[in-house]
Image (cartoon, rainbow, N blue to C red):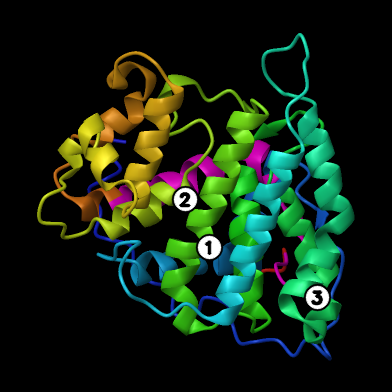
Amino acid sequence: MADTVTDAPPQVSEAVCQGVLDVSTHTFTQPEKIIKGAGDIPRWEKSQAYGDLIGFILTLNEAVKGKKISDTYPISEPIQKVEGVLATLSGWIDEIPPVDQPQRFGNKAFRDFFTRLQQNCARLLTECLGEKYTPAIDELSVYLLESVGNSTRIDYGTGHELSFVAFLCCLYKIGVLTTADYVATVLRVFERYMELVRKLQKTYRMEPAGSHGVWSLDDYQFIPFIWGSSQLLGHPRIQPKSFPKPEISEHFYKDFMFLGCIKYINEVKTGPFPEHSNQLWNISGVGKWDKVNSGLVKMYKAEVLAKFPVIQHFMFGSLLTLQPVT
């Protein structure tokens, strides 16, 4: 990471999602896995889906620059309704407690949670979005369902996180969310999503998807470090060198997504920070948040989006396609 954080801050893509689709005339499809081997990765990197998702991530990255979660920004009715869906899912976790089992990790009660979501996802989204968006529901449901983890392996990782980003991107593509919702998408909706998946991880002792070891950024997440570092750009007090200190994350986690991630890591891991989170420790040696931010974007492209074990599970439909960018 030390040699990947020296670039200029990432520039915003000119278009997040090219135009808003007419839901009444668009032909929606059931998303499916298309990436079959590592040889398909260059095709993926030149695709419409890749371009739209990177553009979406960078646009929201720019939108939350220097902003706190507690700041004032527009919170539309659609934003509140999506938050309501996540609140419903959080309530289901309370209703489906972990079961007694000999295995320490991967509590099988997660499969009951997953099945409930599978059976109710379309209904939840129809109630959330309204009848106008009925044609899009089946396609959207796949991304929401995929975003909570894998029910067979009872694991969660950056591929599931990417699925939620895809879900949000699709809400923009069909016009549910608009440019006025950029900040709230990150600081309200995605923050609620983070609370949900952490609750899932802790309640059902979910395994990290893939064995990353100490050299990865985090066992489960990546995107909140990107958007969270953008929030900290220009902060007068919090410098990269100070984020590993527990008192910093404890004091500021409610306002800054990056520090919320650090607080969570300190809760679930034991031992010295440089040992259990070596990559993050290295990042704390970078002088400025803009270099941290640009380096994390570069790292995300290389270590998540370019990795076949992650992208093989990504679902392509009519909204996010593997067609080349024209």
Secondary structure under the numbered disc 1 in the rendered image: helix
* Mark sitting earlier along the chain (1/3): 3
Q: Residues within 10 Å of mark 2 (few under 14, many from 20)?
A: many
Query: Which image quadrant for residue 259?
Result: top left
Q: Quadrant of the N terminus?
A: top left
Residue 223 badge? 2
Secondary structure under the numbered disc 2 in the rendered image: helix
Q: Residues within 10 Å of mark 3 (few under 14, many from 20)?
A: many
Residue kind at label 1, given as amino acid type: Val
Label 1 sits on residue: 189
Label 3 sits on residue: 136
139 or 319: nearer the viewer: 139
Identity of the residue furthest to the top in this view: 102
Give the mark toward the camera: 1 or 3: 1
Secondary structure under the numbered disc 3 in the rendered image: helix
Q: Is residue 276 magenta?
A: no
x, y percent for residue 292: 27, 48
Residue at left 32%, top 52%? 256
The residues bearing labels 2 and 3 have C-alpha atoms spaced at a distance of 25 Å
Residue kind at label 2, given as amino acid type: Ile
Residue kind at label 3, given as amino acid type: Ala
Residue 291's place in the image compared with 200, above or below, is below
